[in-house]
Image: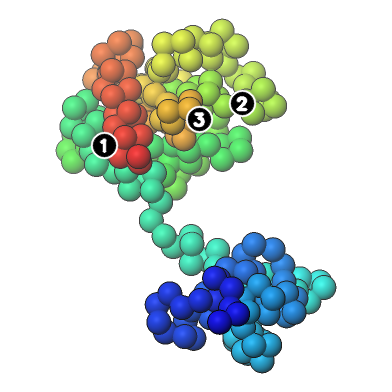
Amino acid sequence: MGQSSSASAVSGIGVVDKTVAILTAAAVEPRSLSDLVAATALPRATAHRLAVALEAHRLLARDVEGRFLLGPRVAELAAALPDPLVSAAAPVLAWIRDECGESAQLYRRDGSERVCVAAAERSHGLRTTVPVGSRLPLTAGSGAQVLLAWSDAALDLPVQAEFAARTLADVRRRGWAQSVAQREAGVASVSAPVLTSAGELLAAVSISGPIERLGRSPGARFAPVLMAGARRIVAALA
């Protein structure tokens, strides 16, 4: 009786439920010890003991006013969780690779660069490998065109000057981009945006390979597969 819902039993293991109540309260806003007691309805001594223990494990920290807030360990643990986009994209990239016969990649934008966050490589023959974690500038390639064409922040970047405004407008209109020997001699690529139902850009899905295999106009041939793959990724996230 008298306890708030945040401190009420959920698992039936008292110390766990009380600890979660403290973490939940600190996640809302920085809390003094008195604030924690008020938010959780825990006895002051209990709240203090658990908060100090959580601080020792870096799950809580204190601001300049001595109030408790979530600590750095929470972010470190969250970073270890599987990335939903990468998990959803993995089987789709393999499907795109098999349909197109070329290496497939998924790129996210990070400032003035694009980062390869997932890939499915050809198992044989000449490959144009882009290792996961590779950072490429937004100044060349079909992936860069897509990330710029659907990015509201593109106007603020000097790199947009690398592509004519008409080029990016055309990419948005048709729903895909292609490049031939733009980023690397002898290499062609095709990319499409991964967009939410609200039109928010999540990433760019791409294939890349030698020009002699993809040809000088690879978009007409491969864009339908990439656009279908992008839709499959979004569906898997739903």
Measured from the top left, where is residue 76 in percent x and y? 52, 66
Q: Is residue 230 found left or right of 204 in the rendered image? A: left
Question: Is the C-beta separation of discs 3 and 2 under 8 Å?
Answer: no
Q: Residue at x 22, y 25 (%)?
A: 100
* Amino acid found under the numbered disc labelled 3: Glu
Q: Residue at x 40, y 82 (%)?
A: 12
Q: Marks 2 and 1, how far apart in space?
A: 27 Å
Q: Residue at x 62, y 65 (%)?
A: 27
* Amino acid found under the numbered disc labelled 1: Val
Q: Residue at x 64, y 69 (%)?
A: 26
> Label 2, on which residue?
152
Q: Secondary structure at mark 3?
A: loop
Quarter of the image with the N terminus in it: bottom right
* Amino acid found under the numbered disc labelled 2: Asp
> Label 1, on which residue?
92
Q: Is residue 214 found left or right of 189 in the rendered image? A: left
Quarter of the image with the C terminus in it: top left
> Label 3, on which residue?
200
Measured from the top left, where is residue 81 in percent x and y? 41, 60
Local crowd at mark 3 within 10 Å, few (<14), some, or many (≥20)? few
Residue 153, placed above or below residue 171: below
